[in-house]
Amino acid sequence: MGNISSIKISVKKRMMTPDGERMLDVDTEIGGGKFICLVGHSGSGKSTLLRILAGLATPEEGSIRADDEVWFDSNLKINVCPQKRDVGYMFQDLALFPNMNIEENIRFAQRIKDISKVEELLTIFGLKNLAWQSINKLSGGQKQRVALARALASNPRLLMLDEPLSAVDEDMRANLQSEILKAHRYLGATTVMVTHNMQEARKMSDQIIRIKNGKLVECDESHCTCPQ
C-alpha cells in the first residue's frame, strides 16, 4: 500500500472524563505526509481520537476514510482492524515487553520479519550497542527510543504517538523531540502526536488540531480545518 494523501474524519463517541460523560464530536481532515499534533487538556478527547484513528476504539457513529479506503463507517457497518489500517502506535505508557530485550521488542512488531530493518532502526536510535539489553535495565530516554523504533518496525503509513514526552524532564524532552522528528522523516508517512503542550506542538508540527471538551476549536495554522 502507498502513502496516505489525506484522512477524513467525521465521528462521534461518548467518553468518560473526570468531569463525567462527554461526547467527542470531530469533523476534520488531516494531510498525508504531515506531522500533526492533537492538542488539548486532560479529558478533552485527544487520546480517544487517536485510538479511534488507530482502530483501538469504536465511535458510536460516523466515518473515517483514508483516501479511497473506508476504515470506519457506522452506516455501512465497516470497522477495519488496526493491522489492516497499517498504523504504528506508541502508547503513553510505552507498553514494552519486559521479558524481551531491545531487539526482540522491535522485531516483535514486524509483520514481515526483516533483521536488516531491525538493525537499521537500532542504529538510527543509538541502540545498536544495547540490542541485547533487558528493558528493565534501560533509562527512561532509552525506553522512549525503543518504543519509537518498535512503532516504526512495521513501516506503517500512519504513525501514532500518545503523549510520548509526558514523563521526561526538559533536557530529555528536547532530545526526544529531535528523535521523533527523525522518525517522522525516516518513515516519510503521516505522523499524529498527542500533546498538551502548545509550544511543543508549534515547534514540531505542520498542522495543529486543538480539542476542547470533545470538540474542535481554533487552530494556529490557516490550513487546519477546525470550525471558525
Image: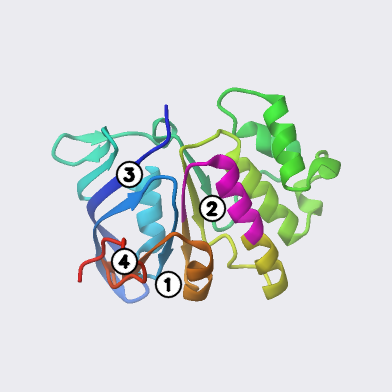
Q: Earlier in the sequence, mark 1 or mark 3?
A: 3
* Residue type highlighted by circle 2: Phe
Give the spatial CA distance, label 1 vs label 4. Answer: 25 Å
Stretch in magenta: 178-192
Give the spatial CA distance, label 4 vs label 3. Answer: 17 Å
- Of circles 4 and 3, the one toward us is 4
Residue 42, numbered label: 1
Residue shown at the point (39%, 35%) measured from the top left: 85
Mark 4: secondary structure: loop
Is 220 positioned to the left or the right of 122 in the image? left
The residue carrying mark 4 is: 222
* Residue type highlighted by circle 1: Ser
Q: Earlier in the sequence, mark 1 or mark 4?
A: 1
Q: Earlier in the sequence, mark 4 or mark 3?
A: 3
Tell me which corner region of the image, top left, top right, bottom left or bottom right, holds residue 78.
top left
Residue 149's place in the image compared with 225, above or below, is above
Q: Residues within 10 Å of mark 2 (few under 14, many from 20)?
A: some
Mark 3: secondary structure: strand
* Residue type highlighted by circle 3: Ser
Q: Main secondary structure of the magenta part?
A: helix
Is 18 positioned to the left or the right of 109 in the image? left
The residue carrying mark 2 is: 91
Residue shown at the point (48%, 70%) measured from the top left: 202
Give the spatial CA distance, label 1 vs label 2. Answer: 16 Å
Residue 11's place in the image compared with 209, above or below, is above
Residue shown at the point (37%, 74%) measured from the top left: 18
Give the spatial CA distance, label 2 vs label 4. Answer: 30 Å
Residue 70's place in the image compared with 116, above or below, is below
What residue occupies the far front of the structure in this picture?
222
The residue carrying mark 3 is: 6
Give the spatial CA distance, label 3 vs label 2. Answer: 23 Å
Q: Magenta segment: does it hold 191?
A: yes
